[in-house]
Amino acid sequence: MAKVIATVSLKGGVGKTTVAAALAEFLAAEFGQRILLVDLDSQINLTTMMIGERRWLELNEAGSTLAALFNDAVDGTSNFDIERAIQRSVSSVEKVTTVDLLPSSLDLIEVQEELSALRVGADDTLAAVNILGTAIKPVADSYDFILVDCPPNVGPITLNGLAMADGYIIPTIPDVLSTYGIPQIQRRVCEFSDEIGRHIVELGVVITKFRLNSTVHQTTVMKLRRDRTIQNVLPDYLPESNSIAGAAEFQPHATLKAKYGTHGQFDRFRGLARTVMVEAGDKLP
Ligand SMILES: Nc1ncnc2c1ncn2[C@@H]1O[C@H](COP(=O)(O)OP(=O)(O)O)[C@@H](O)[C@H]1O
Ligand SMILES: [Mg+2]
């Protein structure tokens, strides 16, 4: 059975999607893992990063995105076909062959509101958050890890991701405003864990866009490390770097080094993937 890890935060732009994409590619290429990426963000960043906008448009028109799944739940239809929706071997890096993707859609914005209404109105309030988990269950055994990239909120779509997650990681830029929301997201996940009657393990905080020459970054990292309410600041800080920013562009790369950068970036991401794998092995069921 796959281990399911969500990338969550209440703040946008902190590197959630970049971490999810890179973790998938490094776990696959460097550690031989079979990965399913699940894009839950209506901004479709992970989706366009992996398959490009043109292919996304085709899938969206064909009803082969997660919007179709949630629309089915709201409308009582059954148009969504998971086998058709899963895009196989999506990595732009030639040798990375075991990363699949469940694509998102801009249409998630509308369905999100209807899902909220469903959650409030239904007798079984958990039904509206188990839609994704139920849909993915038949394919879960084909993967070692399912990485769920969440939007920066705790709306019903994020809750669908959390409801199937064994653990979660919180990417953050180590500055004042980015770290501000960490206790809130921890609290929300805790409350939701209670609601579903299952513990969702905090695997740790991932430091992103780290600038060694920034005093704020240095002191914030120190504060986070001392903070007892944070389970674990993962030791592999991701540097702010042009090549990591450029990795978001949909284009072929010969190697992971060519995609993410050779000045320490490759080693940091590889280290992070290794850490997450070890933490998941120790802490997840
Ligand atoms: N380590 C990094 N160095 C430089 N740019 C980064 C880094 N991580 C992410 N970015 C860029 O920052 C922006 C926000 O990152 P993203 O992963 O989309 O964050 P989120 O999913 O939290 O909104 C994107 O343009 C992305 O390419
Ligand atoms: Mg994102």
Image (spheres, rainbow, N blue to C red):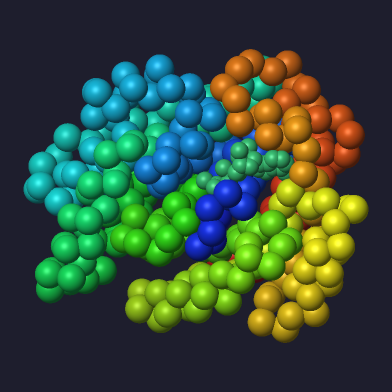
Task: Identify the residue at horizontal 72%, vertical 83% (top origin).
Answer: 228
Q: Quadrant of residue 234?
A: bottom right
Image coordinates of residue 222 in percent, x first then y, are: 83, 72
Image quadrant in which you'd find residue 120: bottom left
> Could you tell me residue 182's position as x and y percent?
59, 70
Q: Is residue 173 above or below residue 30?
A: below
Ligand 1 quadrant in view: top right
Q: Position of residue 57 (x, y in %)?
A: 34, 22
Residues 254 and 208: in front is: 208
Q: Residue furthest left?
A: 76
**From the viewer's perspective, is 122 left or right of 268?**
left
Residue 82 is at least partly visible in this image: no
Q: Is residue 284 above or below residue 211?
A: below
- Residue at image coords 35%, 78%: 195
Which percent across, then down, holds residue 130?
30, 60
User: In the rendered view, does 122 fall on the left or right side of 198?
Assistant: left
Residue 20 vs residue 174: left or right? left
Q: Nearer the viewer, residue 57 or 78?
A: 57
Viewer-side residue, 19 vs 243:
243
Query: Image quadrant for the C terminus?
Result: bottom right
Q: Quadrant of residue 192?
A: bottom left
Observer able to see residue 212: yes
Q: Nearer the viewer, residue 61 or 94?
A: 61
